[in-house]
Image (tube, rainbow, N blue to C red):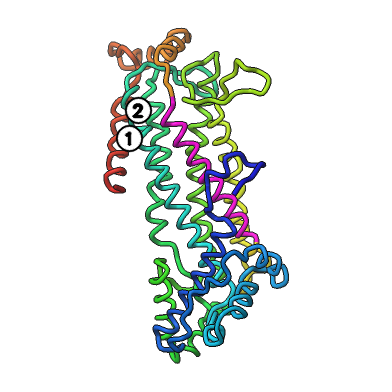
Amino acid sequence: MTDLFWPGDHLAGDLMSDEAFLAAMIAVERAWLGCLVDAGIAPADARADLSVADGDAEEIARRADVDGNPVSALVAILRDRSDPTAARWLHRGLTSQDVLDTALIICVRDVLIRVGVECAAQIRALADLAERHRGAPALARTLTQAALPATMGAKIARWLDGVLDAAEPLADLRMSLPVQVGGAVGTLAATTELAGSVDGALALGDALADELILAPTTPWHTTRSPVTRIGDALVTCCDAWGHIAADVATGSRPEVGELAEGSGGGSSTMPHKHNPVRSVLIRRAALTAGPFGATLHIASAASVDERSDGAWHAEWATLRALARRTVVAAAHMSDLVSGLRVDEARAAANLAAADGLLAEQRTMSELTGRTTLPDYTGAADRLVEATLDRARRFLEESS
């Protein structure tokens, strides 16, 4: 995919594309048909690979306008092009929401895998940077102003903590992504009729989850926490990356000069510039991710009856945009931290030039009556070590 409105979109490849979504919907229909056959409900010759609809995304998209979602159009095409036995049993017991929700979850799983890989790369790079610049003197700033002495290692460790906070839940989330099987109103009524019993209907849902490598669960038609959890995880990643990007952009200003991107961008009219383009593009994603997450929560709160009239529909494109933009930001952040340059000499010079930094230390000394310590960086080194230990554990557990 390409998107002139969102430079870097190509880095997300086919993730959450129309083609990927179509393939996932077909996979759900194929797997369900196989489950009906395996359960002895449908005859053996009803099994089909359903590849007859591959490449029909544009046609399905146009026809989706009739019923408000692409599943009806897909099922019509599949039935028209499949043999009579497969066509007869296709989609029986499912509803459009079952197919669409489960397909969305399949697409999101691929996104979470990619983001997880990028986060692991970032954690390695940031841990290396924090170790390398662990004791380098630097100026800590609060509310944009000079505050106290610190170290570059402490700053980078805070970045690392943010990425770890985002990365750690991703694996658990990926393993708990739920299948959606509920039928027309989430009661499995049609499936119960097909299977001949409630136990048989529930077993079919579990079998579909196993086939698609998803978590079995009860229907969540209008309980949209599975979607909002995904959105929250992606937004949390963008939040962490936005913090790093903002610090790098500020630190790369010529008057600060403590940080620099390994491969900055140029200007169409000012050849002297070395723009922090990765930071700019990451901040763009961070600034827009939150509203996407908010839209998913608003849609969840607006759920009504057994299938929402618009709130459900608002999720699909929102989740796709958030997911693809998160993947792009993840790739940009991996590139940024792997090539980031830290100017220790400039950081030390900025610290030396700041006035009034030891006023707090003098106050503490007067209170305690003890001799002041030489650098006034407190537990910074111990805190860096704690973060590095956390990063090592994460990388060992995820390898």
Q: Tell me the amino acid under the disc marked 1.
A: Thr
Residue 328 falls within the magenta-colored stretch = yes
Secondary structure of residue under mark 1? helix
Inspect the image, locate mark 2, and give the three-letter code of the amino acid beneath it.
Ala
Nearer to me, 295 or 106: 106
Q: Mark 2: few, some, or many residues within 10 Å (few <14, many ≥20)?
A: many
Q: Tell me, yes or no, whether the highlighted magenta stretch contains residue 374.
A: no
Q: Residue furthest right?
A: 66
Residue at screen point 59% across, 56% down: 296
Give the vertical position of 261 relative to 83 (above or below).
above
Tell me the residue at 53%/62% (across/down): 104
Numbered disc total: 2
Quarter of the figure with residue 395: top left
The magenta stretch is 314-340
Q: Nearer the viewer, mark 1 or mark 2?
A: 2
Which is the main secondary structure of the residues drawn in magenta?
Answer: helix
Q: Position of residue 187 (x, y in %)?
A: 52, 81
Q: Earlier in the sequence, mark 1 or mark 2?
A: 2
Query: Mark 1 and mark 2: span between their CA atoms?
Result: 9 Å
Q: Which residue is mark 1?
A: 387
Q: Is residue 3 above or below residue 144?
A: below
Provide the residue designation for mark 2.
130
Q: Looking at the image, which residue is at 56% across and 80% down?
A: 82
Quarter occupied by residue 3: top right
Q: Is residue 186 above or below residue 107?
A: below
Kindly check if marks 1 and 2 are in contact, taking CB atoms under 8 A apart as contact: yes
